[in-house]
Amino acid sequence: MSVQVIEEPLLEVRNLKKFFPITNSLGRAKGQVKAVNDVSFDLYPGETFGLVGESGCGKSTTGRTILRLTEPTAGEAIYKGQDLYKLKGRELLKVRRELQMVFQDPYSSLNPRKRIGHILEETLKIHNIGTKQERTDRVMDMLSRVGFQPEQYYRYPHEFSGGQRQRIGLARALMVNPNVIICDEPVSALDVSIQSQVLNLLEEIQEEFQLSYLFVSHDLSVVRHISDRIGVMYLGQMVEEAPTDELFNNPLHPYTQALLSAVPIPNPLVKRERIKLKGEVPSPLNLPSGCVFHTRCPYATKICEQETPVKKKAAANHAVACHFL
Ligand code: SF4
């Protein structure tokens, strides 16, 4: 785990919404998928904020929408006092340099016909940084920083393993000296032994480059290992947010409690009762009324069907969206 949470937020996400329209065969709108539905949180300098939840809960879409890889439906993403969604052209390009992304499958984002050195140099070219020689030198430095030999500059993406490609993805994000990196399931596709290497590298680099991470993952053990604070998402909404230890020792939201009860404890003498939720996750095309979790919540009452709970403080730095907390 990295640096303590201090000072003003570096990035403030406010009431973020991302809806995808669904059309019929005639192109007429027949509904919308509410992938991200009113999500707010802060990211502080030097911290790692983990976003967890089951697949399809909107955590990856949240990360991609912050970076405008997909445009938001509503909301704000305030970075150093500027709303990213109001920036255009050069202004946006300048700020985008400071916010980078590392993807789950770096292979799909690496041009298979280009050598790794050239792929990394391209990032500098896009942002008009340095002379040709300076760019080459910087790529060499960065490759060495993430554990490669100079001759690997000339290799193609297919010549690297999954873990090596993820290190290349990280090197590419670091080329432009970012402040924030959004890591979207960066170790999910890797073997467990390689996962820990990449996680260790992420932690080393965070300290060295003073980075803030938004770390998106469905894997609670990974998120626990790397995050200072965690936000739990369910059906496009953030239902609980707390510092990592607080969340794991004292989960308050019934969904978080169920999610954590499924995490194995590395001690055969300690047994934890698994909370099994009833039913399936509802479709984001047709969200339940009131609290989106009420169709599966063991504590749901009438008010849960009728009114949407607002995320509020339950303890210091611990916020939860439930009528009864
Ligand atoms: Fe469960 Fe109701 Fe709380 Fe939602 S508001 S988590 S349904 S008790």
Image: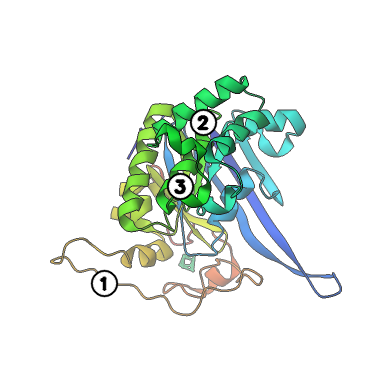
Which residue is at 61% across, 20% downward?
130
Q: Position of residue 157 (x, y in %)?
A: 52, 48
Q: Amino acid at mark 2?
A: Asn
In the image, 288 versus 77, the foreground residue is: 77
Q: Quadrant of the N terminus?
A: top left
In the image, 116 versus 312, the foreground residue is: 116
Q: Quadrant of residue 147?
A: top left
Picture layout, residue 282 above or below residue 314? below
Local packing at callout 3 (Cα closer than 10 Å; few below 14, some 14-19, many 20+) is many
Q: Which residue is mark 2?
A: 179
- Nearer the N terminus, badge 3 or badge 2? 3
SS of the residue under disc 3: helix
Q: Amino acid at mark 1?
A: Glu
Local packing at callout 2 (Cα closer than 10 Å; few below 14, some 14-19, many 20+) is some
Q: Position of residue 107 (x, y in %)?
A: 53, 52
Q: Position of residue 231 (x, y in %)?
A: 45, 51
Q: Nearer the viewer, mark 3 or mark 1?
A: 3
In the image, 232 versus 84, the foreground residue is: 84
- Nearer the N terminus, badge 3 or badge 1? 3
Q: Which residue is mark 1?
A: 273
